Amino acid sequence: MSSAASPLGPADLAPGRLLLATPGLLDPNFADTVVLLLDVNDDGALGVVLNRPTALPVSAVLGEWGDVVEEPEVLFQGGPVSTDGALAVALAAPGGEHAAGFQRLWGRVGLLDLDTPHELVAGTVDRLRIFAGYAGWGAGQLEAEVAEGTWYVVPGEPDDAFGEEAGGLWRRVLRRQPGDLAFHATRPADPDLN
């Protein structure tokens, strides 16, 4: 496989990158997931699972934020850590990167502090998704998992975090990759049944 057709490696871990679980990752917390990396530093990494919507409406837990989030207007299971807490990933409106409660991560994507009064956020955010919990790795842990082939590391696009059809995200992201990596999108869920 040429380097242009290969996924990125451990050195390429950065906010905005996506982790796609390889077919060999059987941990039920991460099997078939797409994880958006939000922070990577010497102490570890933090991200949210993008393709695990729950049945719980945001409005049932966070009231008025339910009117602002993307369809489907439900909480997403962001990962197995701190599932009683919420992280809000937002796409700032042009010029909204410096709005109250918004912490820019890359481009116009950032985290929104849900304690910010709803009125101060109006008009500053184009898109919003709220995640219950997150995925976290200690120092060197994610790099080791990538090196052993547990994750494909690929560039992310802002729309990945906000799309309506979360169930097909893993395959859609793979299909847009160059070369041989795109062929993994056609792999059946259980190759033994093929």
Image (spheres, helix red, strand yellow):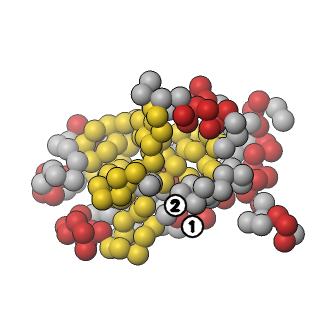
For the residue carrying disc 2, how many other residues have a C-alpha within 10 Å: few (<14), some (14-19), or many (20+)? Answer: many
Q: Residue at x 43, y 61 (%)?
A: 77
Quarter of the view holding residue 13: top right
Q: Judging from the image, what secondary structure is the residue with disc 1 in? A: helix
Q: In this view, does 72 lie to the left or right of 154?
A: left
The residue carrying pointer 1 sits among few (fewer than 14), some (14 to 19) or many (20 or more) residues within 10 Å by Cα, namely some
Quadrant of the snapshot with the C terminus: bottom right
Q: Specify the quadrant of the image occupied by residue 154.
A: top right
Answer whether labels 1 and 2 touch (C-beta < 8 Å): yes
Q: Relative to residue 125, is residue 144 depicted above or below?
A: above
Quadrant of the image occupied by residue 168:
bottom right
Gap between marks 1 and 2, in whole Å?
6 Å
How many labels, in total? 2
Residue 169 seen in the current view: no
Residue type beneath disc 2: Asn
Q: In the drawing, does residue 176 fall left or right of residue 161?
A: right
Q: Which of 176 and 14 is in front in this view?
A: 14
- Please give the label number shown on residue 51: 2
Is residue 64 visible to the viewer in this orientation of the structure?
yes
- At horizontal 69% and vertical 36% (from top left) the residue drawn is 148
Up-down relation of residue 62 to residue 20 (above or below): below
Q: Percent x, y for residue 52?
A: 49, 63
Residue under numbered circle 1: 167
Point out residue 172 in the picture as x, y percentages from the top left corner: 64, 57
Q: Quadrant of the N terminus?
A: top right
Q: Name the mark on residue 56.
A: none
Q: Residue at 45% across / 54% down in the picture?
A: 79
Q: x, y percentage for residue 91?
A: 36, 49
